[in-house]
Image: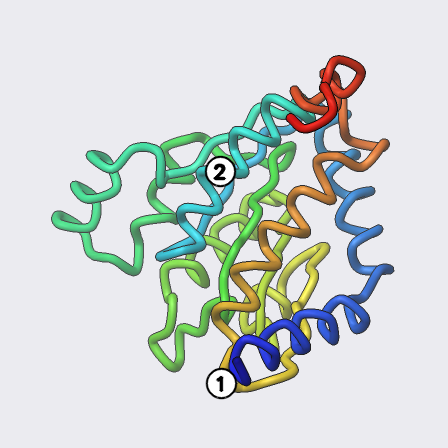
């Protein structure tokens, strides 16, 4: 029970410490990207790759973006990794997608990428490529945010309240913040299923 109580206490503390100004900047920056007909490319590894795939659905269906993630094409992702190496895989994918100054790249990462330490170097390389072509970079990351927080045009760093629980909290809050963003009135274009059905929900359902 103690671990459960501590984890939930930490979750409440993170909520209280979230930078709402950074979230607002993220919403406004993404709205400007969409309104300029820019595409959104969403990158992550591990659990963050699953979040990237989930987010593509939400940004497209709820918020009206043209959005893509390499996590949704495992054949290309593994072929590029096998033939050219892991570090270049996202940058090469963005290049093949003709990333340009009208587009944006959204990073989900716990550490945010750090080439010097060899941690998520593919994320760092993708950010550098995006910046080189003038694309916008956004992030929802943990710890100090690494290369993402240093380079992004808009980034939310999930506060660290316990160094032993950085990964589970960061990945959990990636989902919380993404759902906040796509359902924000400045971005939401389509009603979600159960919100639209609430008048028909019967007591006890």
Q: Is residue 75 left or right of residue 41?
A: left
Where residue 117 sits: x, y (%)? 38, 81
Q: Residue furthest top?
A: 200
Secondary structure under badge 1?
helix
Q: Is residue 119 left or right of residue 76?
A: right
Secondary structure under badge 2?
helix
Residue appearing at x 75%, y 34% in the figure:
183
Where residue 167 sits: x, y (%)? 48, 71
Mark 1, residues whose alpha carbon is within 10 Å: few (<14), some, or many (≥20)? few
Q: Quadrant of residue 198?
A: top right
Q: Earlier in the sequence, mark 1 or mark 2?
A: 2
Q: Give the label on residue 27, or none.
A: none
Given residues 78 and 195, the one toward you in this image is 195
Where residue 159 sits: x, y (%)? 68, 75
Given residues 56 and 147, the one toward you in this image is 56
Residue appearing at x 68%, y 51% in the figure:
177
Q: In this picture, is 142 found above or below 64?
A: below
Q: Determine which residue is flagged by label 1.
A: 164
Q: Determine which residue is flagged by label 2.
A: 54
Q: Residue furthest left?
A: 83
> Mark 1 and 2 residues: CB-CB less than 8 Å, in contact?
no
Mark 2, residues whose alpha carbon is within 10 Å: few (<14), some, or many (≥20)? some
Q: In this picture, is 27 found above or below 2?
A: above
Q: Is residue 160 left or right of residue 92?
A: right
Residue appearing at x 80%, y 59% in the figure:
22
Q: Quadrant of residue 48?
A: bottom left
Where residue 88 sits: x, y (%)? 31, 54
For the C terminus, which image quadrant?
Answer: top right
Q: CA distance from mark 1 to mark 2?
A: 26 Å
């Amino acid at each position: 029970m103690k671990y459960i109580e501590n984890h939930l206490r930490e979750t409440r503390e993170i909520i209280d410490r979230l930078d709402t100004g950074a979230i607002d900047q993220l919403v406004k920056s993404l709205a400007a990207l969409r309104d300029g007909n820019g595409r959104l490319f969403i990158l992550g590894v591990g659990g963050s790759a699953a979040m990237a795939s989930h987010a593509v659905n939400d940004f497209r269906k709820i918020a009206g973006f043209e959005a893509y993630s390499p996590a949704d094409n495992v054949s290309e992702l593994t072929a590029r990794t096998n033939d050219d190496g892991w570090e270049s895989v996202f940058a090469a994918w963005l290049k093949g997608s003709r990333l340009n100054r009208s587009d944006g790249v959204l990073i989900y990462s716990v550490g945010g990428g750090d080439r010097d330490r060899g941690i998520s170097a593919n994320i760092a390389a993708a950010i550098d490529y995006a910046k080189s072509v003038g694309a916008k970079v956004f992030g929802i990351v943990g710890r100090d945010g690494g290369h993402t927080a240093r380079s992004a045009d808009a980034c939310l760093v999930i506060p660290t309240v316990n160094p032993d629980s950085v990964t589970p909290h960061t990945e959990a809050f990636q989902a919380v913040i993404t759902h906040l963003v796509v359902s924000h009135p400045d971005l939401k274009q389509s009603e979600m299923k159960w919100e639209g059905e609430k008048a028909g929900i019967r007591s006890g359902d």
